[in-house]
Image: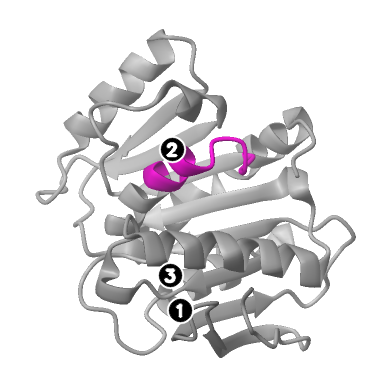
Amino acid sequence: MLTIIFPTRPGTHDVVLETPAGELARCTVHVPDTQAAEAPLVLVLHYGGEPSGFYGRPLLEMLATGPWRELGAVLIAPVAAGGDWSLPRNTELALDLLQAAQDHYATAPTKRVVLGYSMGAMGVWHLLSRAPNLFAAAVPLAGPPPPMLPPLVLRTPVHAINSRADRLFPAQETAAVIATLAAGGAPAQVTLLDGIDHHAFGTFAPSLAQLLPWLNSCWSAAEPRA
């Protein structure tokens, strides 16, 4: 069980916690100014590199103060040791934090969202394979899905966003996998942008704002989740 004191005041807070293994970990938590009953809960997975400090905070702040502000969501951005979300310790940290935040803030089980950028986008697909029934929606940004996905992954609505100008992770790779999933009946789609460099995550904000109707439709159709 995680040992964490969640912030209660509205705003964005950096938090140090202790894992069940007795290790210290870091996360950033955003508490909305007004938290409605049955508020959404968004898990934010940061990009790659060697994480230092509260590495997921910039991506979380971009969402909280910009495109997804009107959701009134609680957002939580853990820091992955070594930057790889597929490592068991990082997977467990993300999932345990999600559950602990839901319990503390009484967020809606049918409104859980996972969003990740670059390496975090790969982490999104990893968590969908690990916990296929956990999220109501998934948004991988600027990162490719694996070429082969377990069938259970197809249950979660996914909207990927990639730039055709991305030289690190070509958008065509993501588009091809999404097309295959959609052809098989999966609730998967992709938006391809032009002229955005891989490292300019802030320029994805307008496209993320356009996902708000899609998110609401995902929540309306979501089955009760534990």
- Residue furthest toward the right? 37
- Residue furthest toward the front? 21
- Which circle, 1 or 2, is nearer the viewer? 2
How is this picture coloured? one colour
What amino acid is labelled 2 in the image?
Ser
Residue 99, placed above or below residue 148: below
Residue interval drawn in magenta: 125-136
Residue with the mark numbered 2:
129
Residue with the mark numbered 1:
57
Which mark is drawn over residue 205?
Answer: none
Secondary element at image label 2:
helix
- Left or right side of 163 for 182: right
Which mark is drawn over residue 59?
Answer: 3
- Left or right side of 117 for 169: left
Q: Quick one: quadrant of the C terminus?
A: top right
- Which circle, 2 or 3, is nearer the viewer? 2
Depth check: 211 or 85 in front? 85
